[in-house]
Amino acid sequence: MSYRSFFVLVLCVYCTCLKANAQVTVPDNPVATLKKGHPRLLVSSLADFEQLKKRIPGNEFLIKAENTLRLKADKMLTEPLNKYTMIPSNYLLNTSRSVLDRSYTLSMMYRLTGKKKYADRLWLELDNAAKFPDWDIEHFLGTAEMDQAFAIAYDWLYDVWTDPQKQIIKTAIKDKALEGGLLYYQGKGPGFDWAKAEHNWNQVCNGSMIIGALAIADEEPQLADTLIKNAIKRLPAAMKHYGPDGAWFEGPTYLAFAMRYNVAAIACLESALGTDFGLSTIQGFSKTGSFVMAMSGATAQTFNYSDAPLRIVTMPEFLWLANKFNDPEIAAYQQKYTDHSTAVEMLWYSDKKLRKAAELPLDQYFRSAEVASLRSSWNDEKAWFVGFKAGENGVNHGHLDLGTFVLEKNAKRWVIDLGPDTYNLPGYFNGGKNKSVQRYSYYRLSTEGHNTLVVKVGQDANQNAAASTFIKKFKSDNNNSFGIMDLTEAYAPNGRSVKRGIAMIDKKQVLIQDEITTDKPLDLYWQIHTPAIITLSDDKRSAILKMGVDELKVEILKPATKAAFEIIDAIPILNEPLSKGNTPNEGIKRLVIHFKAIGNVAITVLFKEKNDNTVPVFQSLSAW
């Protein structure tokens, strides 16, 4: 890392930390303002549920949500109880997640219908999980989700449970979750130290401590005070990474995971204590919904960088954010794409008049995370969309993918990110800043598994795992929107300067331009991954990508000679088979330009519609 880059990075992190922590007040006695009685988590009284019941008739959204939730709850009535099952890589998490889903769903359906069958089935689930030998405090994500499951059930159905039932639920929360959390705050936790983490574990685990503690705070005030103070103190360490623009370095999918617990904790603090102690004012937090939208094209699927599958990212927390920060666009997004599978969506739904998403900017750059997107329209299904990233390698859930991009046109994703591999592969989570670790040997996590430049040196084709890179210039304009990434650190010492520019020209073409300066010849690959059928021209300087009836043309503009496309399989460039356990990349091909011994070079590739014969005038990145 150059001195300048290091200085800029340190300054940004320092300022973000100041902004995050300066706004949060850690209270001496947080439960002093505790609302008496139950429910107090996410709602302020039973009247909130009654009011929701009155709003449902005549409201199409809520009717659909209630019907979906009812079907789901009725199915749960006959499903077997969850078992104490440890699964490699996730341990008890899948079981805890199922109990949490049942807790919210069955509690809500009891409140909406008054039918005891829902409470009775939930009790069986709680009694069963309370008898588990533990909630897996070594892998605390499972503990966290089970804690929230019990807390919501205890609070929302407090008037339903008998005294012996209440004692069982409360004891399980205290002994199997909160006491374990306290060990981590004391530096004695037996597993990964999430209390000091700056990624999604922080929000999930600290958030659950807040929720569990609030559920029994009147009965265990001293323990609740200690846990809530510790959680509020530690949450900003992760939440600072939302700043300044709402992005998340682990990608949109893990943003949604973190926000699920981040929002729940803040909402519970507000409903139970009347304040969130400034957590919701942390820079960038209010903009997280806009980030997810910006990372999605006409398919609504996100730019799925890091360990994220290709899918539409929705979350009921969008509705909470919309209400909290008066942001109707993200409410409209959630209402459009939701599957109505969560109970809290009904609580957070609002009838606010919504503006059209066309008011949102077409092109957006998210600082700190160093990701950006360009689009030709928000409301045209045939729109162009491109998402790309610089940022840091070696982050939690990160791949060695700096400079990668995805591209959409006609509601099809032509250039794709392969997403994660199987989490229980050996060494999958042994990542970090060392590129020699096993994690980066898996194709989907390696540099060659992405749509970026690959420099092969001997048996190594990966970027530097400790690289930190930036989008050096970004411009949004109707005729020419672009971002320029300085990727030099990712390829040092093999490239003296490596820059990639991505531009949308006249909202009808996408141009990828790479400029490499080197002191020695490089074995260099330019590449994309695509599910399209590829047909090369006779001179192999252009290709037609075909999906269904739609076609795109890809042209090599620079260099003018000695550059040709190849079609190869999505396997390592040494033509080795995928290592044991790797997920096969079926139906995916790589469109590649291979330079076997290239010095200084500019590579310009243009994406356009098949019958578009226009070619932009070449300009070096310095002239953009």
Image (cartoon, helix red, strand yellow):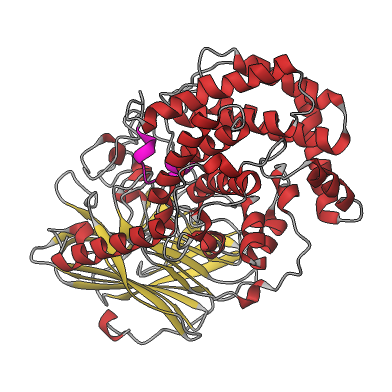
Residue beneath the point at 53% across and 57% down: 280
Q: x, y percentage for residue 552?
A: 51, 68
83 in relation to 222, above or below:
above
Q: x, y percentage for residue 276?
A: 55, 51
71 in relation to 219, above or below:
below
208 in relation to 189, above or below:
below
Q: Nearer the viewer, residue 605 or 187?
A: 187
40 in relation to 117, above or below:
below
Does residue 279 belong to the magenta stretch? no
Would you say 381 lies left or right of 163 here?
left
Direction left: furthest residue: 519
Q: Quadrant of the N terminus?
A: bottom left
- What is the quadrant of residue 538 in the picture? bottom left
- What is the quadrant of residue 504 in the picture? bottom left
Q: Quadrant of the C terminus?
A: bottom left
Q: x, y percentage for residue 290?
A: 55, 64
- What is the quadrant of residue 219 in the picture? top right
Q: Nearer the viewer, residue 339 or 497?
A: 339
Q: x, y percentage for residue 319?
A: 67, 56
Does residue 194 belong to the magenta stretch? yes
Would you say 272 lies left or right of 435 here?
right
Q: Which residues are magenta?
A: 193-203
Residue 79 in view (yes/no): no
Residue beneath the point at 34% across and 40% down: 196
